[in-house]
Every structure is written in C-alpha cells, then in structure tokens.
Amino acid sequence: MAYLRLSPRKENEERFGLDAQRTQIRDWAKARGVKVVAWFEDVDVSGTTAWDARPGLQEALAALRSLDAGVLVTAKRDRLARDVRVMGRIKDQLDKHRAVFLSADGMGGSSAQASPGEWFAGHVIDGVSQIEHAQIKERTRAALAVKIDRGEMTGKPPYGYRAVPHPDRKNKRGHPLLLLEPHEDEQRVIAFAIHLHEMYSLRQVAEKLTEMGLRSRAGTPFSHVQVGKMIRRAEAKS
C-alpha cells in the first residue's frame, strides 16, 4: 500500500507534489514487480502531525489488516513524518499490524526486525528531517513578519472568507490592514457540508459535494481533508 502526504507549504509542488510522489512509487513498484493494492493520502498535513490526526494515514493503517498487506511505502521517508517522536509512534502502529515501512527513494525503511545499523540510519534521517522542518518554519516566520508589516496577505484566506482592506486602519508603512469577511457562496457550501456530515462520513460528504457539481476554490473536487478542515473551522467559530 502507498501513502502520500502534501504539506501546507507547496512551494516545491513539481518535486514533492502528489503526482510526483505517485510517479516515484509506481517506478519503484514496477522495478521490483510489486503491486500497489491501495493508495492513501493526506493533503495540507504537516510532517509533524500525529498519526491519529491524519485521516489518510489512519485509513492506511486500518487497511493494512483488512487488505492483508504487509508493506506501507512512501516516495520519501519524510513523507511519513518529519519528527522523530511522531515517526516512532507511527512505527509502533506498523509493528502492531505486523507491517513494515519502505521508502521508494531507498533512504531507509523500517521494521521490527531492523538491524542496529538500519535503526540508527533511520533515526539520523528522521532527525535531519526534523531540523530541516524547523529551519523552514523559521524562514517562513521571518518572511511572514515582513508581509504583515507591509499589510500584505500572508496566505490565502480560508475557504468561506475573503480578504478586504480595512477602511480605516493602516500599518506603519501606510498600507491598509486586511480583514477577513464571510464569502456568502462559500459559507453556504460549508453550511451544507455541516448538514451532510450529520448523516455521512467526511469522505462521503466530499463525494456528495462533487456529485452536486460543487468545487473547491481552486476548481477541483473537495477532498475529505478539505471538508474536515472547513467544518472544524466553522464549528470552532460557532
């Protein structure tokens, strides 16, 4: 089985996007005569997110037993986790299912039977990934501080809202501060999704929205991850 993860930062979409990950895993499987029986993914999920807060990974772990699959493969090791503790807990879950983890790029998989050398190499890779993640966050934080000072948007408004200039307030550079105001059409979609979720799972809600011709802001079908985020955000504000 294959697991794909796309972080909230998509600056390297061509190299690390879902299509690139699928291609790498397919090439790996073809070279070894391996059949990938199922694909699971988490979108807009950080590598430091716990396994039980990732819908796609939870489904993958549950399917290991139901599909009688013994291997979970990712394009790169850091697609599974970019935190040593998170990786350790995911490994515990894999061990419970008597499954192993493999990385298509060959940079260290894991199993309960790993040799001391293999265990150490994997631990080093996880540590480096964690440091890289922290450095990326620090660079992002510095860049955001500059944008905030200029009164610029620091990211896309969440689904259901749009950014508008504040009529009165400006920053010290004279740029209008930005406010979020509800987007009526998108708010109706969110309200409908909340209603559907009273009867259906997040994945089923996403399918229902797609069947009705409703699309995300990017014009693509809603994923269960997107649906879950917008429902949780709306419930947190209520």
Image (cartoon, grey):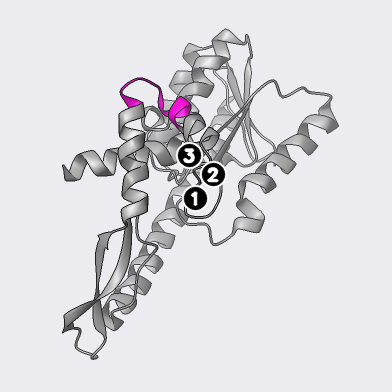
Vertically, is 42 above or below 95? Answer: below
Residue 18 placement (x, y as % from top left): 62, 45
Residue 1: name its quadrant.
top right
Disc 1: which residue: 128
**N-terminal-most mark, 2 or 3:** 3
Residue for point 36% across, 52% down: 185
Q: Magenta stretch: give its range.
A: 197-205
Of 49 and 219, nearer the camera is 219
Of residues 224 and 95, which is closer to you in this image? 224
**Residue at 36 percent of width and 28 percent of height:** 196
Label 2 secondary element? helix
Residue at the far bottom: name it: 174
- Identify the amino acid type marked 3: Ala
Compute the Cα span from label 2 to label 3. Answer: 11 Å
Secondary structure, mark 1, is helix
Residue under label 2: 125
Cα separation between marks 3 and 1: 11 Å
The answer to whether any part of residue 160 appears in the image is no
Query: Where in the figure is residue 236, as x and y percent of width and height?
Result: 20, 42
Figure check: 196 above or below 13: above
The reply to whether the C-beta atoms of the residues labelled 2 and 1 are less than 8 Å apart is yes
Q: Position of residue 89 (x, y in %)?
A: 40, 27
Residue pictured at 47% horizontal, 28% vertical? 203
Quadrant of the image occupied by residue 192: top left
Q: Nearer the viewer, residue 59 or 227?
A: 227
Is disc 3 surrounded by few (<14), some (14 to 19) or many (20+) residues within 10 Å? Answer: many
- CB of mark 3 within 8 Å of CB of mark 1? no
Q: Which residue is mark 3?
A: 81
Residue type for callout 1: Val
Q: Kindly indicate whether the residue at mark 3 contacts the one at mark 2 (C-beta within 8 angstroms).
A: no
| Above or below, 82 relative to 35 | below
